[in-house]
Amino acid sequence: MSLRDDAGVKPRIVLLAAAALLMTACAPRSSTTTVPSTTTVESTAVVVKTGGTTLNRELVTSDRRTRSYHLFVPAALPTGPVPLLVALHGGTGSGTQFQRQSGFDDLAEAGGFLVVFPDGVGRGRESDRLRTWNGGYCCGTAATQNVDDVGFIDQLIDAIAAEYPVDPTRVFAAGHSNGGIMAYRLACELSDRIVAIGLQAGSLGVDECDPSQPVSILHLHGTADENHPIEGGEGPKSIADVSFNSAAYSVETTAAAMGCEPEPTDSSWTQCDGGVEIRLVAVAGAPHSWMADESVVILEFLLNHPRV
């Protein structure tokens, strides 16, 4: 498996191969859900891309913050409930940056599912610079202000499901770096909504993980990551001023929280409550930047781990 993107730019994914996988994995299900109301304020900015549409919107959260997000809707959604992917950018990034970098919108167009790219809380007068997520011990403004990002994502899912036929058994989160740390927090604290997470270069940043339902986890980490070392600690290129938990600690702790058997097989726990799986993949020589094939690898794992 090649998972390298030294340039840190949006990968050029082979969509024909990916589409066959995604069309199968995204086959509609018959389940339905009732969604509570939420306060949403829509902007007028609309960007059309790859046949689908990116809707740039805002939402007023329960803590009275106005939060922005970017929802990609493919040109044609399948009949019936569809998956929803919440894609979380890294620290100092943004939703639009991660949309360009990850290529999840291209995969959503090919596979017929929804993907939303929310923005973390930033600095500056408009709170739009150096955006971060409150993943627990990291990062930046979001962590120091103890922003309720779990509540934001919960409300965001409600807002999208009120308008589109979201399948509650296939609501996923993916994240990079600080976004990966946030994904771990969602697995622990929003497990009634988030079914599975996939991440690169993140870690478990909360002291307690007590999910109400088990969640599948795919954790990818480069062995040459100098920003968030796979062994934990503070890397030579880190800007977070945080001593990170290791990848091994993160998966072992969450595996125990998900009711998995104590010993993994090849860094994978498959005997867990609810049929979930916890898997750690160490990518030899890979740095911190988003890796070229990673979006497809993460998405394949997520779509193959719906809630049963």
Image (cartoon, helix red, strand yellow):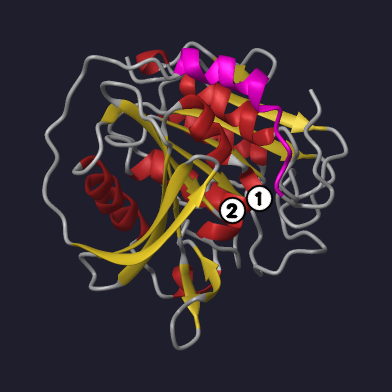
Q: Hey, which quadrant is residue 27 in on the image?
A: top left
Q: Give the residue displayed 34% in from the left and 23% down from the top.
A: 78
Range of magenta residues? 10-25
Q: How many marks?
A: 2
Q: Give the residue displayed 67% in from the left and 44% down from the top.
A: 246
Q: Which residue is mark 2?
A: 98
Residue 115 numbered tag: none
Contact check, label 2 and label 1, Cβ < 8 Å: yes
Q: Give the residue displayed 21% in from the left and 43% down from the top.
A: 163
Q: Main secondary structure of the magenta part?
A: helix
Mark 2: give few (<14), some (14-19) or many (20+) Cα within 10 Å: many
**Relative image position of residue 14 (x, y in whole percent):** 71, 27
Q: Answer whether residue 236 is magenta in the image.
A: no
State whether residue 51 is above or below residue 213.
Answer: below
Q: Which residue is mark 1?
A: 101
Q: Nearer the viewer, residue 271 or 27?
A: 27
Judged left or right of residue 73, residue 18 is right
Q: Nearer the viewer, residue 210 or 191?
A: 191
